[in-house]
Structures are given as structure tokens and as C-alpha cells.
Image (spheres, grey):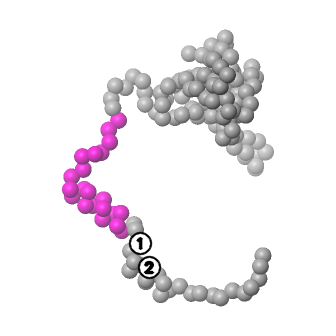
Amino acid sequence: MLDDNEFYIVMKLTSGEQVMAVLREEDEEHVLLESPMCIRTIPILEASREHVTAHPLCQFSDDRTFVISKRDIMFVKKLHHLFIPHYQRIVAEHERISFVSKDQKQELLWEDDVDQEEAKRRISMLEDLAKTPKDEEEEKRYRVFIEGNDTIN
């Protein structure tokens, strides 16, 4: 669990993400972050305000630490002290409701064992979704071509 003795930062990556995190270590080329959270602001024009959302930097991993290359960082600033409790709450909430709970010893199941009838049914569904040449010929009969002029916009 994060406490008040951590070095909380906010950074902007060259890809555009704003990230709140705990800075653990850094060297000449990399930084080690703990519990990085991407922050996104969504303007609500009708109310003249913004909605702020947060999600883990990598939602599909249970790792809490990430090594980021400094060349991928635009800036790093100390997180304002008023935002630290909010960041701690967000991290705690995401740890509680993670994609795959650390308590689970159960593996994710993928449907690799499909019988022939089910495979045929799925292929038939895909064929129905895909256009066949016959459908394209029928569509061409109903097309109307309207010749334009030489106007350049």
C-alpha cells in the first residue's frame, strides 16, 4: 500500500498520456515507476467543466512496477499534495477490482476445443457477413452514377 512518504509524480509521455505514479528509481536512461495510472480529462461543454478518468498504464498485467525510457517522457513534475489522496484511492480501487485477481489460481479458459458442427456453424456465419461477388454484381445494378463538373475546391 502506498503511503505519504513516497515520491509522487505526474508525467507526460511523448505518446500524449498523462501519468500519475510513484517514482522509485532512475538512472541515465530509464525511470522505475510503481502503480502508474493514466489520467484522461473529458470536457463537458454544457456544464463548462471537465470529467477526469483514470486507468492503469497497462490494464492486462498485474505488475505494479514499470521501467520507462526517458526518451519517451516529455516532462516529470512532483504531484501536487492535494492530488496524492485521490491518486492513492484510485490505485487502491484498481488493486481491489483488477482484471485478474491475484487470489485467483484459476487460469483463463479459451475455447480451443470446438467440435466440427460448431466450426461449420461459425464458418457459415462468417460467410454470411462477407460479401460474395454475386452480391457485388447485384449491388452494381442499383448504382446510379451522376457525372460531376470540373470545379476544384
Alpha-carbon span between mark 1 and mark 2: 7 Å
The quadrant in which residue 86 appears is top right
Task: Tell me where residue 113 appears, x and y as whole percent.
Answer: 24, 46
**Is residue 109 one of those drawn in magenta?**
yes
Identified at 57% across, 32% down, the residue is 56
Task: Tell me where residue 108 appears, x and y as whole percent.
Answer: 35, 35
Q: Single out the residue that lies furthest toward the top.
A: 5
Q: Single out the residue that lies furthest toward the left.
A: 116
Tag 1 secondary structure: loop
Span of residues in magenta: 108-128
Identified at 70% across, 30% down, the residue is 11
Q: Is residue 148 above or below residue 59?
A: below
**Residue under pointer 2:** 136
Q: Amino acid at mark 2?
A: Glu
Q: Is residue 91 visible?
A: no
Q: Is residue 35 above or below residue 141?
A: above
Camera-side residue: 17 or 93? 17
Identified at 35% across, 63% down, the residue is 126
Location of the C terminus (image quadrant) = bottom right
**Residue under pointer 1:** 131
**Is residue 132 one of those drawn in magenta?**
no
Tag 2 secondary structure: helix
Circle 2 residues within 10 Å: few <14, some 14–19, many ≥20: few
